[in-house]
Image (spheres, rainbow, N blue to C red):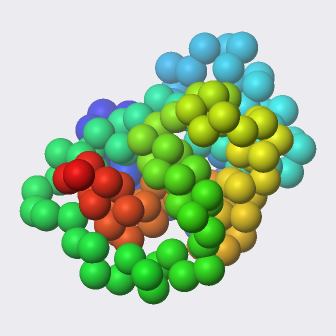
Amino acid sequence: MGTVAALIRAVHGAPHTGASGFVLKDTPPADLLSAVRVVARGESLTSPAVTRRLIAEFVRSPGPVSTRGHGRLLAGVTDREREVLFHVARGLSNTEISDHLHISLATVKTHIGSLLAKLRARDRAQLVIVAYESGLVGAARRK
């Protein structure tokens, strides 16, 4: 992937082509095998490297992060789910979120599943986008 813009276009277009996962071409073989297993179980996967690059691009994006629409985009999301979403948007893994919030890994996965369903997101990358578009991450960053 040459540029961040190309990466964003590729990630954005992947679900439209039926892709259930997205990894970079330099992904180590062991990680690639793990990704294939995740997708084979019917789950979606975006590699942490992709998520980190997308987050870095959103952080560098010019202009203030709007908090308008925060309630509308996150309607029906519980306070705990918002906390989990915030940490997903920061690029934390499920284990890191579990440790940070002092909840079990299974509970983190349950919250992420609920977020995916409530926000009609296909994967973590789309959750990150919703977190930024809603102002959840930008509002927390300015505190």
Q: 119 or 143, which is in the foreground?
A: 143
Q: Residue 97, located in which quarter of the rendered image? A: top right
Up-down relation of residue 68 to residue 79 (above or below): below
Q: Residue furthest right?
A: 41
Residue 57 drawn at (x, y percent): 26, 45
Up-down relation of residue 27 to residue 115 (above or below): above
Q: Residue 77, located in which quarter of the rendered image? A: bottom right
Residue in view at x 61 percent, y 58 percent: 80
In this rendering, position of residue 15 left or right of residue 58: right
Residue in view at x 35 percent, y 44 percent: 55
Q: Residue furthest left?
A: 63
Q: How many marks?
A: 0
Does the rendering let one see residue 1?
yes
In this rendering, position of residue 129 left or right of residue 127: left
Q: Residue 22, located in which quarter of the rendered image? A: top right
Residue in view at x 68 percent, y 14 percent: 29
Does the rendering let one see residue 12?
no
Up-down relation of residue 8 to residue 75 (above or below): above
Residue 111 drawn at (x, y percent): 71, 55
Up-down relation of residue 93 to residue 54 (above or below): above
Residue in view at x 66 percent, y 34 percent: 102
Q: 57 or 1, which is in the foreground?
A: 57
Q: Quadrant of the N terminus?
A: top left
In this rendering, position of residue 10 left or right of residue 57: right
Residue 84 drawn at (x, y percent): 58, 50
